Amino acid sequence: MRKDLVPGEQVIVTTRPQPRKLAGAALAFIVSPALAAYASAWIIRGEARRHVPFLTAQWTPWLVAACIAAAAWVWLGFCLPKLLRWHGTRYTLTSQRMVARYGRLKRRDQQVNLASVRNLTVHESVLQRLLRSGNISLETGHQGVVTFQDVPEVATFRDFILDAIEELPEERDAQPGGTTHYPAEALPWEMREGGRDER
């Protein structure tokens, strides 16, 4: 991210989404090999042949291999993609922008200039409140609303954004295709004061 900064821009904080969505993948990572081991032992003991008579002893290696393959599929097809998706998502707040980057090989960027922010809203579910995370929505005049999901320590992150907005230069020479920075006093009251009260 630092190599993408414009002159005078500084990184304030960089983080990843709150890892609560990895809970299911972590559970599957632990349970799937345990179930595969149990099923393999059940097959080796001959329980499969007892319940399904046409399964001869020649089927045993294939059934055990199927159990191992099922566990490997859970790891590679479910757990690993979720981990890579979480690890490839990064939220970066700079002195001028809020940037979200998604993916490693196939990358998608989402940026909001702090100077264009008109309102900031924090949404928290019950689970997110317990984990101190939340969704931050930045409302801009021309882009509509941009939401950043599962931001950790959402109250602190929100305060960082508000402080960065207050620190923006009072004015900036407008250039074609550029943006104009507004003084903190010009921001709506809800942005400067009310936004801080949302918990």
Image (spheres, rainbow, N blue to C red):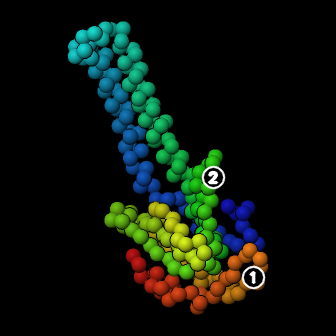
From the viewer's perspective, is 67 left or right of 191? left
Quadrant where the image shows the C terminus: bottom left
Q: Which residue is mark 2?
A: 107
Spot occupied by residue 11 in the image (x, y as percentages of width and height): 65, 69
Q: Nearer the viewer, residue 18 or 53?
A: 53
Quarter of the rendering containing residue 10: bottom right
Q: Describe the element under mark 2 as helix, strand or loop.
A: loop
Spot occupied by residue 61 in the image (x, y as percentages of width and height): 39, 14
Q: Are marks 2 and 1 in contact (CB under 8 Å)?
A: no
Mark 1 or mark 2, which is nearer the start of the sequence?
Answer: 2
From the viewer's perspective, is 57 left or right of 3? left
Work out whether 190 lies above or below 8: below
Indicate which label's residue lies in the foreground, 2 or 1.
1
Spot occupied by residue 148 in the image (x, y as percentages of width and height): 51, 65
Quarter of the rendering containing residue 64: top left
Q: Residue at 41% across / 25% down in the picture?
A: 68
Q: Which residue is mark 1?
A: 174
Spot occupied by residue 86 in the image (x, y as percentages of width and height): 51, 52
- The amino acid on which the numbered mark 2 sits, given as a three-letter code, is Arg
Quarter of the rendering containing residue 1: bottom right
Q: Residue furthest bottom?
A: 185
Q: How far apart are the alpha carbons under marks 2 and 1?
A: 30 Å
From the viewer's perspective, is 173 left or right of 166? right
Work out whether 138 lies above or below 30: below
Q: Alpha-carbon neighbours of circle 1 within 10 Å: few (<14), some, or many (≥20)?
A: few
Work out whether 115 lies above or below 130: below
Q: Nearer the viewer, residue 178 or 89?
A: 178
- The amino acid on which the numbered mark 1 sits, given as a three-letter code, is Ala
